[in-house]
């Protein structure tokens, strides 16, 4: 089984982190292919950046589709382009916010979210509502560490994330979802420190994508998610989805 | 007052229709500037096309911002890129689905929507829920005429839209919202035929944008909608939002 | 275009304030007619007072209808008698709570409300839910200044309203709605002080009423809002709606 | 125990029917006092009529309060003036829509409503949502018999109500609520004919009012439902609530 | 009229308390039969204990059904086995959480709940949502006194319950529901101390059960609540519901 | 990894079917242990039967816990005893309704359910709401084949299930969830016939349980789902959870 994990931003170091997190939980027969788009922002912390990231993400999905991968993971907590990717792909496509919410929902009655900047909490709530999990979310808290500073020890990100997770748990949540792909390598340690289940969306999306493939389940294609109708695209984005396979694979599991 | 109405698709004829619809309802002192993006799909009938339309739309918003326009209208019923445009713009930004829903909500207890293809009804419901209008929507019906065929008399679009509007009203709605910018010039006639209020989102968004400007109200900028943080964008979309002002203005009111 | 703005309470000074606020934002060709009912309470701070205000309000709507005005504004934040007024009027009728919510909803993701007495917050929540905005409201706070003391400098109302608006914004709202027609003349100053969009419902309702008239949209009249069936009314309220036009117009714009 | 049942319309024959329905289920020690307002419409089938009925209803509540009755029933399915009545009364006040919904909710998972004119179904839904029962209501159907024709055999009301009840049950409801005080004397027969629980709101409100009195429970008076603040009322409604006790009692149980 | 009040736990002293609370509010002609199951846990403070309590509870319902009682009360705030009991019983079955919520909902706009252990608050919220009262509940607070310690003066339960009730009222609730059958005899005193309506579910369920019997209303039996289909039950629970009538009646009113 | 799949009814043939369905999708290193309770009903088609099934189910969970299994599946679509099982187990516990809903939610925007008897549809809706999926469910349809007749070719179950699935898809769902563990072996064929994704909850729960174990995630144990407090249990259920390991394992994968 091949799962292509698309980091929607263009920071290769983050793609590597994401690839490792996915490979660490993938089943024995699963190949993880972590890829970086050819165009887009270095990180995603606003609606604007999310919008600019989506074409590059969709190019990677089109390439993965050409390469016959079995499923896709969209590895940014805003789940950018998820609906569009589902139209393009034959197999399942899972967003990491979606996956984190699904996993946390099975661990108790309610859960909270700890994300990066406060300006992204609105999007997290919107996605929770969209997927049905709004009533299960106790709160969405921000540690106010920018995405690309998460792996800088000077940012104190681990301590700040632990602190916000503790606040979430004190508020009555049974579990916590980490709200950024860049937190993937903090998850195990944070969970140990707070003594409660903490969910990394990258890992969760990986095993859920595998699960759907194992079940033989794919996106329903009879209505909203049918392949997009043929349509002329003009300007710099024309022919975008048939660009040469320039994606660099990293974090590939054995 | 200057309002820039952005048609997110690249079909200039549709921009002209949209510009006329906006100019027809704009107040005496208001200049309507209808623009077409430099890149994107010819029409938007899928999530994929919506995603490819957004960068070109945002370029137009950035250009309008440079030109000091007072407000923006996003003239596609999926309200593509609305949150991102609100981050970029100083003045208000109104989507035509949003505007159609707001107007219809003030005309009775509940309303229905008549859109183009059935595959777009999911997005219409999602937007209604997002803005709070979910409980007020009775149903979303599709006439199954593609966007670019709406103004082709051979499509029978007017009769089909009338038929669906009648079905919506028979179901208990007090008003109907037309779910596509391309239906703007059908609105008056359809309303006459069905004998009930029918709302065109383009016209509604134009007067609502004017209203907010008149009230001195702008998007709240202290949190989620603050300007996006400075960020490197690489690849074909790099420098996209500072591209030369190639937008063609059409449908400009006196 | 003529818009009749009905102050549902009998305090003429408040009608004058309301009329000025409406006239200040009305378009060039619009005449604002602010009127006071012939019967009812001096201010509305309870369900009981709201109930006693409605017959006098409806008398003004009937008079306006006789006079052929184009639209009505109901200028009390409880939106008293709004459904009944919609049955009586040919043109649109807008409540100021409704209008404030609609305007604020277009300025960001969520908004809060600052009202007069805490005992009125239940009604504000009820209206927000009724119009669909419940999920967009962060909180409803009270400054505990009675309606008729708002324009008494000794009440400290401006400072108290500013304080509550700041609390609303600190709680994550993108905008604030002022929850009383009597706060109309505080709005601009409060907005400046708190540095965020603050919405006065009277002004908002005025431009929204104009907007609907400009769009040619009226209340749907095929069901719930059809004219009331002929019915005998006995006692002191008999013939109430055909009383002589004793309404005093004030705040009329040029 | 004395329960004053207020028919908010001015049709004495309907007051008598309501009084009989209440007396038929009241406990041994309970006196039912059915009263008619001194002013208002002959029946309530629109928001306008509901608004004109409320002052007369509140006068009856004020008189009942002066007479020391233990609880009130508001006997119109729109629950007119319920919040205002709760401010005026010391003891509990129950509306018949409210009561019908509460009773039906205890008889299964979901229930439907059969009302008079289709134009009143919007209000029934609004009340169901307000009280929390929205998700439990399967549908609200109308038999299209006007209120005052319900007891006219020529209207065929019984057969029409039976037909609509059957449709509600076929749709999966466990019980049916009759949506008009004027249907009180149809209830037993309709229930027999359809072979399922059918709830009359007048009877339900009577026993629920008794229940609250027996439990020693009254409306919470620390916030929204505190007595209205002293306020000048001018015009024909001035001094309305201290009018002489002209209410005619009928349908009084032994 | 005979109402069988089933204490789902096996602590006879608590059955006696429950029986007294029910008998104290029952009408003149009503016989209260408080019973204890033959098997189950000594108290219910977890989902596990609730599950083990249900078979014994259902045995008591089957016995009551054999004895021809008119209605049942399930006297534990988790409303254990309520749906199953409704399938078994001919007459109405009321849970005390359900009853407490219904009563409180008629006393104002919103209410709060004060329960025993924090671990039971999730169940209280779940029931509130199930019955439709979720939007009316302000909060569910715990006094952290175990069920069987409530009547031990050393537990300080009364003072702790008063304190939590005060917090609920300070948060804007109009009334409070006590969240445990074991609090039945605290209710009057707590209500006096906090000066606001406080609802005991046991008393509320008793009068609501009487109310439904008086109205001639029973559970709808055409669908979900029809008698269970004949089915083989094996093992220790086989034949459970036809066990000999070992139930001990206590708290029987005159 | 060892996953114990508990069939909550006592029909061994159904345990075998369930075990095969689970083993068919389990990963290479996973051992599936399908077990049957020592007491309970032959099938579960009512709330009553569900209640009688839970103690036997919990006994199997206690036994599995003693045996150190890694996770549990509750293989009945009513998800009986799920909360209680989560209190008892150290590892994750997944219900098959829950699992089916989670899987289907990732395959499109909305899904429908096809279950056995119409009397069970209320429970399916209740669970969907509880888990947050209510807004995603289009409808719950019944094929009216009893559980134990599903594998009897004479019941025509396959054709009936196909028919109901087609109706669900025609109503706009992107996927269908089969609402009974007894439909596990119909799933692949039904999916082929209807040409859309059809989800079997047993298979879905198996891979989701594996997923959580792989992620190192367990039920949050700090609040509602902490182990039940020590408590005396009397009567036939006393000592129930420490009974000898009489469970018969079947359907064990290699």
Image (cartoon, coloured by chain):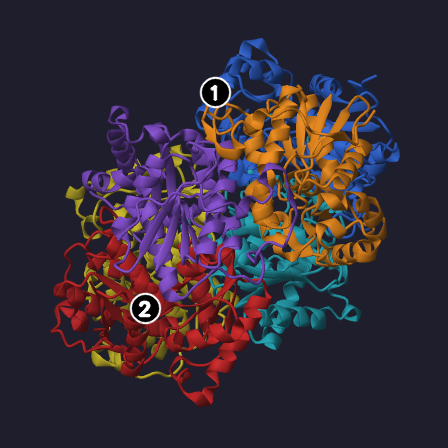
Chain colours: A orange, B purple, C red, D yellow, E cyan, F blue
Q: Nearer the viewer, mark 2 or mark 1?
A: 2
Please give the name of the residue rendered at 32% of the width and 66% of the height, measured from the top-left corner. Answer: C80
Spot occupied by residue E107 in the image (x, y as percentages of width and height): 48, 65
**Relative to E161, is E229 on the left or the right?**
left
- Is there a contact, CB below 8 Å, between mark 2 and mark 1? no
Q: Chain of mark 1?
A: F
Determine which quarter of the picture holds residue D32. bottom left
Please give the name of the residue rendered at 38% of the width and 66% of the height, measured from the top-left corner. Answer: B215
Neighbor class of circle 2 (other Cα within 10 Å; few <14, some 14-19, many 20+) is some
Taking the view exactly as shown, the residue that stands out farthest to the bottom is C154
Say whether mark 1 and mark 2 are on the same chain.
no
As displayed, is residue F206 above or below residue D235?
above
Please give the name of the residue rendered at 35% of the width and 73% of the height, measured from the top-left corner. Answer: C48
Spot occupied by residue B171 in the image (x, y as percentages of width and height): 31, 38
Q: Quadrant of the N terminus of chain F?
A: top right
Distance from label 2 to label 1 (Cα)?
Answer: 56 Å
Taking the view exactly as shown, the residue that stands out farthest to the front is B244
Q: Quadrant of the C terminus of chain F?
A: top right
Spot occupied by residue E220 in the image (x, y as percentages of width and height): 46, 39
Residue at disc 1, secondary structure: helix
What residue is shown with label 1? F166
- In the rendering, which numbered label is found on residue C25? 2
């Amino acid at each position: 089984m091949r799962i292509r994990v698309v980091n929607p931003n263009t920071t290769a170091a983050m793609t590597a982190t994401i690839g490792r997190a996915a490979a660490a939980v993938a089943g024995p027969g699963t190949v993880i292919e972590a890829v970086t788009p050819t165009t887009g922002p270095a990180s995603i912390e606003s609606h604007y950046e999310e919008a600019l990231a989506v074409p590059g993400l969709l190019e990677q999905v089109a390439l993965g589709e050409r390469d016959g991968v079995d499923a896709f993971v969209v590895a940014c907590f805003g789940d950018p382009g998820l609906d569009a990717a589902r139209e393009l792909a034959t197999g399942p496509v899972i967003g990491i916010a979606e996956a984190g919410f699904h996993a946390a929902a099975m661990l108790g009655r309610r859960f909270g979210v700890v994300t990066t900047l406060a300006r992204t909490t609105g999007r997290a709530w919107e996605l929770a509502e969209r997927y049905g999990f709004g009533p299960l979310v106790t709160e969405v808290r921000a540690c106010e560490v920018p995405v690309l500073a998460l792996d800088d020890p000077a940012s104190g990100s681990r301590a700040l994330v632990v602190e916000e997770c503790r606040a979430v748990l004190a508020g009555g949540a049974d579990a916590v979802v980490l709200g950024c792909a860049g937190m993937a390598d903090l998850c195990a340690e944070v969970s140990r420190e707070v003594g409660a289940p903490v969910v990394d969306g990258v890992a969760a999306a990986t095993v859920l994508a595998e699960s759907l493939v194992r079940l033989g389940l794919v996106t329903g294609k009879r209505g909203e998610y049918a392949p997009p109708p043929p349509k002329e695209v003009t300007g710099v984005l024309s022919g975008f989805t048939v660009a040469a396979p320039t994606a660099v694979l990293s974090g590939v599991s054995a």
